[in-house]
Image (cartoon, rainbow, N blue to C red):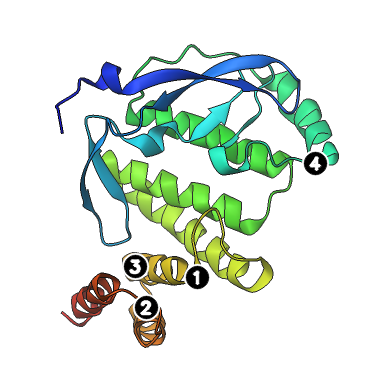
Amino acid sequence: MPDYKPEECIYDKSYTCPVCGEPFKAKQVRKGRAKFISNDDDLKPNYTPVQPDYYDVIMCDHCGYAAISSKFDKITLSQQEAIEKEITPLYEKTDYPDVYDVDTAIERYNMALRNCEAKKSKAGEKAYIHLKLAWFCRDKNDKSSEIEHLKLAYSGFNEAFTTEKLPICGLDENTLLYILAATGIEIGYPEESIRILSRLIVKKDLSSRFKQKITLLKDKIKN
């Protein structure tokens, strides 16, 4: 795989806002340009020279509507009206750089979170955004903010597990359980994490690689 410069990985993708109807462009990562390096224990992916997760929030620069890409077009009429009432009047356009840094990503995800509150999104969508914000705080070595977002992701995913249909923001049951266990370790629930992992590892639809990750995570708790 060739080595690309960050700016060579980015392009402008055209969208039409489902709230205001205006066309706009948003930065996206070209397929195959970001090189995968590793996963953290909670499956946070690490890439070079750009982080694709930084670009997953799509935001209209006309009205301020923002959402993660998988949810951007999934908006009801009442939610559109809520955005127009609660978000658009306060929105001020920001000129973002071509290559997003972690602070830009955090700003855009926080805007998506504000939109979630306005449109009364389900717990799973908000938990997913908090998980990503926790990862970005990790990139900044901001441990206290990371833990704060992990706690909100943990509680939100637990609620979503009992009230929402899977998958949640692309996370299937096995992946979500694993993330809950890994997150629980970080925020002080090791016993609950062991219980989740013990429940997970006996499932028959797991790959050997995934089972190995579960075993390593259990060993981390015991040590």
Question: In this figure, which residue is indicated by the disc labeled 3?
Answer: 182
Gap between marks 1 and 2 measured at Cα: 15 Å
Residue that appears at 76% across and 21% down? 20
Disc 1 residue type?
Answer: Glu
Q: Nearer the viewer, mark 1 or mark 2?
A: 1
Image position, residue 102 (x, y; %): 34, 31
**Do tag 2 and tag 3 residues touch (Cβ < 8 Å)?**
yes
Q: Position of residue 124 (x, y in %)?
A: 59, 57
| Residue linked to disc 2 | 193
In front: label 1 or label 3: 1
Q: Are marks 1 and 3 in contact (CB under 8 Å)?
A: no
Q: Which mark is residue 173?
A: 1
Q: Which residue is mark 4?
A: 76
At 74% from the left and 42% from the top, the residue drawn is 119
Q: Is residue 186 left or right of residue 95?
A: left
Q: Regarding mark 2 in the picture, which secondary structure is present there?
A: helix
Residue at the (27%, 41%) spot, across then down: 139
Circle 2 crowding by C-alpha within 10 Å: few under 14, some 14–19, many from 20: many
